[in-house]
Image (spheres, rainbow, N blue to C red):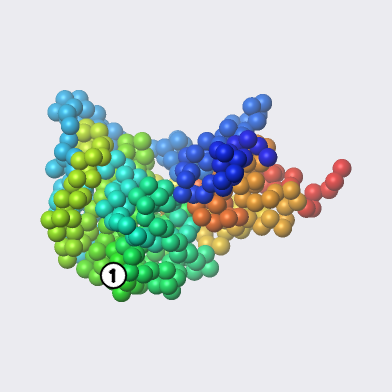
Amino acid sequence: MENGRKNWVNGANGQEHETPSNITIKGIIGLLVANIDADEKRRVISLGMGDPSAYSCFHTTPVAEEAVVHTLQSQKFNGYAPTVGLPQTRLAIANYLSRNLPYKLSPDDVYVTSGCTQAIDVSLSILSRPGANILLPRPGFPIYELCAAFRQLEVRNFNLLPEKSWEVDIDAVEALADHNTVAMVIINPGNPCGNVYSYQHLKKIAEIAKKLKILVIADEVYGHLAFGDKPFVPMGVFGTVVPVLTLGSLSKRWIVPGWRLGWFVTTDPTGNFKHPKMVERIKKIFDICGGPATFIQAAVPNIFEQTEDVFFKKTINILKQTSDICSDLIKDIPCITCPHKPEGSMAVMVKLNLSLLKDISDDIDFCFKLAKEESVIILPGLAVGLKNWLRITFAVEPSSLEEAFGRIKCFYQRHSHQQKEH
C-alpha cells in the first residue's frame, strides 16, 4: 500500500481510520497527486476538484474582471469593510436572490462571507448547543462534517436515493430526527450527485422540516447550474413554510472560486431570524470572522447588474456537453455505472463494481492505483460518504475528459478479471 494511502486510511498514527469528517477533498486530492509516479511523463488530468477555472473552456465574464479592476483602481476600497459586508454588496445580493423568490429580501437578511465554506461554518456555529444534532445528506459535501465536529454538533446522515434521482429519503429524515435536531442540510443542485430537485420534492422537504420543527440549510453554491428537464428552484421559495438559511457564492456560476465571495442569507419572511438575540449572535460570529476582500465585495453590484444571460447560457451549454460526454464514456467501462445522468452542478457519482476487478480492494485502492498508473485523479466515494462509489467532476474541457476516460478504460482492462495472465 502506498504511503499516501496509508496516511489517509490508517491515520497519522497508523491506527485510526480517517473519515470525511476529518479530511478534506483538497487533502485527499493532494495525497492522490503525491502518489503519482515521479517518472510519469503524461500530464495529470484531474477529475477530482470542482474548479472549472483550471480549464480554458471555462472562464469568467469580462464584466466581472472589469468590475474588480475598477473597484481596485478607484482606491476607495482598500480599507476594512463592515464585518457583515459592505451595504451595497448586501443590497445587491438581496436583489439578486429576490428575483427568484415570491417575496423581497432586505439587505439586513444578507451577510457576506469568505466563500460558501465560511457560510457553512457560520450556519453550524449559530445552531450549535450542547446535545444538538444536525441531519446531513449521504453522499454529501465533507466540509459539513468537518465543521460539525469543530462545533460539537452530532451528525446524523440521511440517504439520498440513487434509484430516485438522488432524492432525499424523507422517511429516513423523520426517523433520524428528535427533539435535539436543529436543522437538515439540502444541497441543490447536488454536489456530489449532479441532481436537481423538483419543486414538489423541495415542498416535501419543507413540509417534513416544518413537522419536525427544524430549519433547512439550503446549500445553493451551484444555483442555476441546471441543464436537465428540471429548472433550479431555490429553497427560499418555501421560506413561509419553514425557516431557510440560504448559502451561496459567486464561485461556480461566475467561475471565480478563488475570489472567495459568498453569502449567508436568512430567507425567512416570517421573521424567525429577526429576533434581536439571534441577530446579535450572528453579528458576533461575523465580528470574529474575516470576510472577503473589500474591493471584491465592492465589485458585486456591477457584476450582478451587468452580466448578460449569454454568459450563463454558454456555461450551461458547455456543462451539458461535458456531462453528456462523461455519461457516454462511463458506459464503455464495465466496472463503473451511473445510476442517474447528471442534470446540474459539475459532478456525478458512479458505482464501482469490484467483482469485475481482480486486484482492487475498494474505492480508495482504485483511486490511488489509477493516479499512480494513469495520472488521472478522481475522488473515492468514501470521501463523500459512499464506500465503493466514485465522484467524477465533468467541468473539464472535452478533450481532457475524453483522454482521461481513455486512460480509465485502459486501467480497467489491465485490472479486469478478463485480462489474460502472461
Per the image, the residue denoted by label 1 is: 213
Nearer-the-camera pick, 78 or 362: 362
Q: Position of residue 321 (x, y in %)?
A: 49, 50
Nearer-the-camera pick, 129 or 65: 129
> Mark 1 belongs to which amino acid?
Lys
Q: Is residue 36 above or below residue 358?
A: above
Residue at 17% in and 32% down: 80
Helix, strand or loop at mark 1: loop
* Res 327 quadrant in image: bottom right
Residue at 37% in and 52% down: 152
Q: Position of residue 166 (x, y in %)?
A: 47, 64
Q: Is residue 67 left or right of residue 157?
A: left
Q: Residue reaching furthest right? A: 422
Nearer-the-camera pick, 185 or 393: 185
Nearer-the-camera pick, 24 or 232: 24
Q: Is residue 77 left or right of residue 335?
A: left
Residue 266 makes an appearance in the image: yes
Q: Position of residue 392 (x, y in %)?
A: 53, 49
Q: Position of residue 364 (x, y in %)?
A: 61, 47
Residue at 30% in and 55% down: 128
Q: Quadrant of the N terminus?
A: top right
* Res 352 quadrant in image: bottom right
Q: Residue reaching furthest front? A: 130
Estimate how packed mark 1 is, as few (under 14), some (14 to 19) or many (20 or more) residues with alpha carbons within 10 Å.
some
Q: Is residue 94 left or right of residue 186?
A: left
Q: Is residue 311 left or right of residue 110?
A: right
Q: How many marks?
A: 1
Residue at 37% in and 55% down: 153
Residue 402 makes an appearance in the image: no
Q: Is residue 2 above or below residue 208?
A: above
Q: Quadrant of the C terminus?
A: top right
